[in-house]
Amino acid sequence: MDRARIYDIIYALAAKGGREEALFGNCGQAAREAFARSLAGEAFPELWFEIPLAGKPWMDFHALTSYEDVAGAQAAFAGHGGAYADALSWFAAQGPNKVRQLALSYDTHVGNIEAPAVQLLVDGPDPAVPLAFLAAASRLDLRDAYSGFVRAMPSEWYACYTGVFPGRDAADTDPWLRVECIVGDECQQAYAQDAAALREHLAAVGMGEFDDSLVSGIQELARSSFPLELQFNVGADGAALPVLSASVRFQPADWTDAGRRAEIGRLAAWLQSLGLADERCGLLAQTAFAKRVQHGGESSTVSCFPAFVKLRWRGGMAPDAKAYLMARIE
């Protein structure tokens, strides 16, 4: 089945009923162009649509290539060469149980499809793998930053992905990378009950001043039954910069089970009470679908569901909230 046609079907199903204007703004064409540039090999990538939950609607776009789809192949991205091609070649040459996905992330809300970020998602906690990725992505300048951060982070955390901008010259700006950590059930339960435990772990990775609203916000997410993840921007010295995101992850079944839907509803009501979300929260469940489609004599299942809700704090500013829709073909 033609991949552009599959993409159009997925987007149309997610955006129908007025949801394009309400959730995606005018970013649809830029996202489609980004999709076309992100194809590697013959497989269909996993898609992520990132949308704010308040304010003017817009969308950023992410395309994730799975290791199994390019393993051992001379794969290339349809629209990116240079460091992106080098990162993909390195990724395809890795063995099983080391790497999981390679993501290209586009700021489509500002029309930027030329220079996406690239992120590595790993299958294990071996720090040598992200270090090799940084070299492949032409960001050797950030290897010490990564090493310093993972040495300082709590042993219970698992650094699940590392992200950089391959096209960015380190001389043009203060170098930084992005690291996301799964905190684990034990830490999540501790944070839910004890603000001091959370403050201690944030201080360990170099977070400086942070106010009570950040701590209480993370605690509220930790009290849910959904897995908690923390995302950091990391400076050249390995210390976390004053930008922190906290998210909870959902599974497709969470949107069909009445009890889980009710818990998601309580999270949405809490975000709305803080002014971080509006009525578009009620549209998220409508983007969840799994449909069998036929085209050109072939049949496949396309699906989509809201996979994350994320809060972000930036240097003392009021937090914002976003949702991530995940779509794929099976």
Image (tube, grey):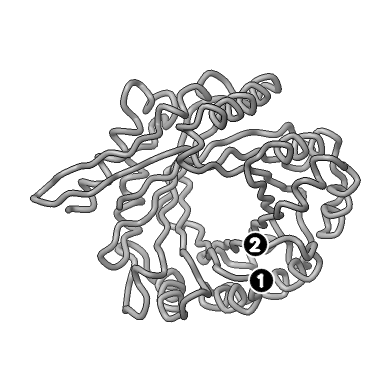
Residue 75 vs residue 192, the one in the foreground: 192
Q: Are marks 1 and 2 in contact (CB under 8 Å)?
A: yes
| C-alpha separation, residue under disc 1 versus residue under disc 2 | 7 Å
> Residue 23, relative to residue 218: is it above or below?
above
The residue positioned 67% from the left and 75% from the top of the image is 143
Where's residue 305, x and y in %?
43, 38
Q: Residues within 10 Å of mark 1 (few under 14, many from 20)?
A: many
The residue positioned 31% from the left and 38% from the top of the image is 11
Q: Quadrant of residue 127?
A: bottom right
What residue would you read off at disc 1? 142
Q: Secondary structure at mark 2?
A: strand
Where's residue 329, x and y in %?
31, 50
How many numbered discs sit on the rendered protein?
2
What residue would you read off at disc 2? 177
The residue positioned 69% from the left and 19% from the top of the image is 273
The single residue placed furthest to the right in the displayed view is 196
Where's residue 260, x and y in %?
56, 32
The residue positioned 40% from the left and 31% from the top of the image is 287
Q: Left of 264 or right of it: where is 273?
A: right
Q: Left of 40 or right of it: where is 140?
A: right
> Residue 310, relative to residue 90: is it above or below?
above
Q: Secondary structure at mark 1?
A: helix
Comes first in the chain, label 1 or label 2 = 1
Q: Residues within 10 Å of mark 2 (few under 14, many from 20)?
A: many
User: Identity of the amino acid at label 1?
Assistant: Leu
